[in-house]
Amino acid sequence: MSDPRSPSVPQYPPYPPYLPHPPEDAHRPAAPVSPVSPLMPVAPPYPAPMNTGPSYVMPGDPDYDERHKRAKKRVEEVRGFYSHLASFVGVMTLLIAINLLTSPRYFWFVWPLLGWGFGLVAHAWGTFGANRFLGKEWEERKIREEMRRRP
């Protein structure tokens, strides 16, 4: 019996799972042999996966301007929320300090905290939450569903 690692018997890497497996009796041609080691193939004997290209829109593409405007608007919305959050934290910290220094028996800072906190939660919902359920993508998806349903 011959040694399976001998140079006369070509060693193949495992067949990739994303390609259909050939029949057991199909002959695969031997891969070129590396000058470094006779057991190491130069390239795999199966084709490389196809590159489908970038998944983003490049400048010059027809959709670039529209997608750029939407992305810019989205970034401005998120930046607006974070500036709102920073001012909320800063002002509330100041109000809590004033409250505890001037009248520590009555916590009046709770009332502005609740009022402004409600506004901050609404801003967060509008920035991060409502778009998932009632945004443009949702609206377009519902329009497509309605068009498919009605002949």
Image: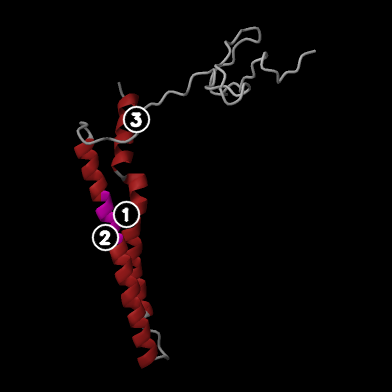
Q: What residue is at 41 percent from the left and 90 percent from the top?
A: 104
Q: Counting residues from the N terminus, which is met first, the one under dot 1 or under dot 3?
A: 1
Give the amino acid at mark 2. Gly
Residue 25 relative to residue 114: left or right: right
Q: Quadrant of residue 123?
A: bottom left
Q: Secondary structure at mark 2?
A: helix
Residue at label 2? 80
Rendered location of residue 3, percent (x, y):
75, 18
Q: Secondary structure at mark 1?
A: helix
Q: Are marks 2 and 1 in contact (CB under 8 Å)?
A: yes
Q: How is the image coloured?
A: secondary structure
Considering depth in this image, is 101 or 122 the residue closer to the camera? 101
Residue at label 3? 145
Relative vertical location of residue 135 with respect to residue 82 in this rendering, above or below: above
Q: What residue is at 58 percent from the left and 13 percent from the top?
A: 30
- Does the magenta portion include 77? yes
Considering depth in this image, is 80 or 132 the residue closer to the camera? 80
Q: Which residues are magenta?
A: 74-81
Residue at label 1? 127
Could you tell me what secondary structure mostly forms the magenta stretch?
helix
Query: What is the quadrant of the C terminus in the image?
Result: top left
Q: What residue is at 35 percent from the left and 34 percent from the top?
A: 55
Q: Is residue 37 visible?
A: yes
Q: Counting residues from the N terminus, which is met first, the one under dot 2 or under dot 1?
A: 2
